[in-house]
Image (cartoon, helix red, strand yellow):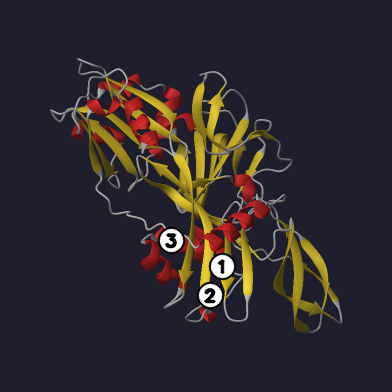
Amino acid sequence: MRSFRNVVLGMLIGSALFGAKLTSEYWEKGETFSHYLNKKNIPISLLQSIAKIDIKFLSEIQGGQLFYELKDQNGTLEQVLIPIGIEMQIRIAKEHGRNVYNFDIIPIIYKEEEYSATIHIAKNLHIDITDTLHYTAIANKMAQLFEGTVNVKKFQKGDKVSFVYTQKMRMGKPYHRPSIKIALYESKDKRQFIYADEEGDGYKSDKKSQSYTVMGKKKVTYTRRVTTSKKASRFGMPLRHARVTSSFSYRRFHPILKRYRPHHGTDFGAKRGTPLLAVQAGKVTFSGRMGGYGKVVKIKHKGGYESLYAHQSRTRVKKGQKVKKGQIIGYVGSTGRSTGSHLHFAMKKHGRWINPMRVLRKKSIRTSVLKKFTKYKDVKIIKYKKVVIKSAKKNKEKLLKYLKQEAKNFVWDVNAQNSMRIKDEKYH
């Protein structure tokens, strides 16, 4: 509680907000930044004061996004904090004694807490977690953890699942999704630890190389050149001979502005006119100019993915056009706010920015191989992939210690009031 008060106190520096009120609201879907300013009686001149390099971040405000407003005891809006991504936020602050507001982008302050829980199976894992902890987000993350490792449909009444997880807290409320670190499933005849990687996917061991099984075909009789099949979620590179010059970051220190800014994409160095390739089949949702991004092409793919190719010298596709994987959709350039010829490539999944390098493959074009067959026999093939599981041993020790203590589960109150009063006497 004291750390939360310090956060709020930091917001009040330079203002005399005695009895101020902090409230949380959800950004209306389809609402523009200028419309919000008009609605809150903030001078529209604030838009002209925003640096050109920061204008593009206004479009990062998500519909349904939780944000905070601080008002004085007379109801005058003093400060606004609007997240743009996980680590950064827009800050609008009123100057003391004047109807003048300033714009800035600053890091989000949050604290990460660790919790443990044990769930006894009565109905099914998802329902039992929600009923016990009152937090559906944990149930969803546990479903992700167990997918492909343990069949939750076979859980019996009386089985139990114990786990360690962390939750970011902001303004005294859960911020972003919880992160499961490790889980233990126990039944009458089985005891299985499940380890989580950075993405929240589960594995039965903490080894760096994990095996997985896929169904394949046994080839016999004759040979023929065929195109290798790729799953819809497999993406190629956006250009041949890719050279990364700037990586994805939720919080990157800008070398010129000397302040933090998000970099929701990966920059690839390349000569002007280098062909740009569609990383996967899809439909063009935008082709044209987009502020500081210059000439841009956006493509919607299966699985909730969307790719963006910025700073092009010339685009080669139109909105509504369907493209194939590896198809040329434009050419490298330096349009918009750019210091030289390069590609700014970005990807979203279900509307949220993700690190493109985690899903891209080395080749953008399909390859073919020689296969022998006259018949196919269904066979199971074991493959291996590299997995990063951090602090596996430490998390296992934490879980075992928690089980010995038999501590009570922490029950979440996610429906708590969205406002609070701030009195200056708390800080004397």
Bin the neighbour count of mark 2 within 10 Å (Cα to Cα): few under 14, some 14-19, many 20 and up: some
Q: Quadrant of the C terminus?
A: top left
Q: What secondary structure is found at the residue carrying circle 3?
A: loop
Distance CA(mark 2)–CA(mark 1) = 7 Å
Image quadrant assignment for residue 323: bottom right
Pointer 3 residue: 408
Write the residue at 53% across / 65% down: 162
**Does residue 391 appear anywhere in the picture?**
yes
Pointer 1 residue: 146
The extreme left residue here reads 74
Q: In the displayed structure, would residue 401 be above or below residue 155?
A: above
Distance CA(mark 3)–CA(mark 2) = 24 Å
Callout 1 amino acid: Phe
* Mark 2 and mark 1 residues within 8 Å of each other at the beta carbon: yes
Write the residue at 33% across / 27% down: 9
Q: What secondary structure is found at the residue carrying circle 1?
A: helix
Q: What secondary structure is found at the residue carrying circle 2?
A: helix
Left or right: 32 as drawn, with respect to 132: left
Q: Nearer the viewer, residue 67 or 394?
A: 394
Pointer 2 residue: 152
